[in-house]
């Protein structure tokens, strides 16, 4: 029960990694509030875990303040922020519209920034912690994903800035960078690959994108949540400003040498 007596807010928590974190935190004693834009997945998660559901826009300061007031009324001050909300932003720069760029900024960067800003007073008082869920797209550029790549790089920068500015105040901030994870959002990208390469299934697409990953497979949401919950726990009290990859070794591959591999 590592999180007994602690209160956590998870953004983008209705499905995928966020939902897996909610399950893990509640199973270990935390009082969990989950924020998201889609009510149905949130309600299903609440039925399963007993978490507090907050159908809100994590990029809107007023909405986050209202949600935080509800958390205070039900649970008290916040100890943990898991800034997990994110979205697409696919397409090359030359054809990316202003609307797509703005949406990518809002979904990936603004959600993390606004929630960090609004929760910092609680986290400073409680000596709490922030975990920002970025992506290995925050460390290297994938093809034709200018918005997503740029904003995930910015999330890494935000995590570093928070770690520097608020570490002396007792708030730890770390960033998790997953590779491919078997979530509904990733399934959509696999379906694009299925159609583009004329593959037989989403599973075949996952095998294709993982063929040069040392572990040879994508991660599961539970595997990523294990790392997130470790960083949020007292087992990681010396970690601040760390960038942790959960990618099966994808980012250690030396791309120019792949031609030598049979």
Image (cartoon, grey):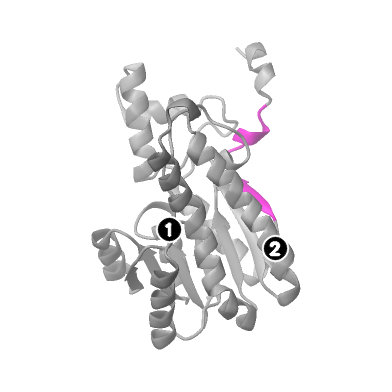
Vertical arrangement, residue 235 with respect to residue 258, above or below: below
Query: Circle 2 — which element?
Result: helix
Query: Circle 1 — which element?
Result: helix
Q: Which residues are magenta?
A: 242-253
Vertical arrangement, residue 169 with respect to residue 58, above or below: below
Q: Quadrant of the C terminus?
A: top right
Mark 2 residue crowding within 10 angstroms, few (<14) / some (14–19) / many (20+): many
The one of 7 and 143 positioned closer to us in this rendering = 143
The mark tally for this picture is 2
Q: Is any part of residue 178 visible from this angle?
A: no
User: Label 2, on which residue?
Assistant: 163
Query: Extreme left residue here?
Result: 40
- Tell me the tag on residue 18: 1
Q: Is residue 163 left or right of residue 149?
A: right
Say whether disc 1 or disc 2 marks the residue closer to the N-terminus.
1
Q: Position of residue 17 (x, y in %)?
A: 44, 53
At x 44% / y 27%, what residue is drawn? 207
The answer to whether the residues at label 1 and label 2 have Cβ atoms under 8 Å apart is no
244 in the magenta segment: yes
At x 67% / y 33%, what residue is drawn? 252
The one of 139 and 178 positioned closer to us in this rendering = 139
């Amino acid at each position: 029960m590592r999180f007994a007596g602690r209160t956590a807010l998870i953004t983008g928590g209705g499905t995928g990694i966020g939902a897996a974190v909610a399950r893990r935190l509640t199973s270990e004693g935390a009082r969990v509030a989950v924020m998201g834009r889609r009510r149905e997945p949130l309600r299903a998660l609440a039925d399963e875990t007993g978490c507090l559901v907050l159908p809100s826009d994590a990029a809107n300061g007023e909405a986050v303040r209202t949600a935080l007031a509800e958390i205070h009324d039900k649970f008290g001050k916040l100890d943990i922020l898991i800034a997990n909300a994110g979205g697409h932003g696919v397409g090359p720069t030359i054809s990316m519209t202003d609307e797509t760029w703005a949406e990518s900024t809002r979904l990936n960067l603004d959600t993390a920034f606004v929630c960090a800003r609004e929760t910092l007073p609680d986290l400073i008082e409680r000596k709490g912690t922030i975990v920002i869920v970025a992506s290995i797209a925050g460390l290297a550029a994938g093809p034709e994903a200018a918005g997503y790549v740029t904003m995930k790089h910015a999330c890494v920068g935000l995590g570093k800035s928070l770690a520097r500015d608020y570490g002396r105040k007792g708030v730890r901030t770390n960033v998790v960078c997953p590779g491919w994870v078997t979530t509904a959002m990733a399934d959509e990208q696999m379906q694009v690959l299925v159609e583009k390469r004329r593959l037989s299934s989403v599973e075949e697409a996952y095998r294709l994108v993982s063929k040069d990953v040392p572990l040879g497979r994508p991660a599961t949401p539970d595997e990523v949540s294990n790392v997130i919950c470790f960083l949020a726990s007292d087992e990681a009290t010396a970690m601040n400003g760390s960038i942790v990859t959960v990618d099966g070794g994808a980012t250690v591959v030396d791309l120019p040498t792949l031609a030598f591999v049979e």
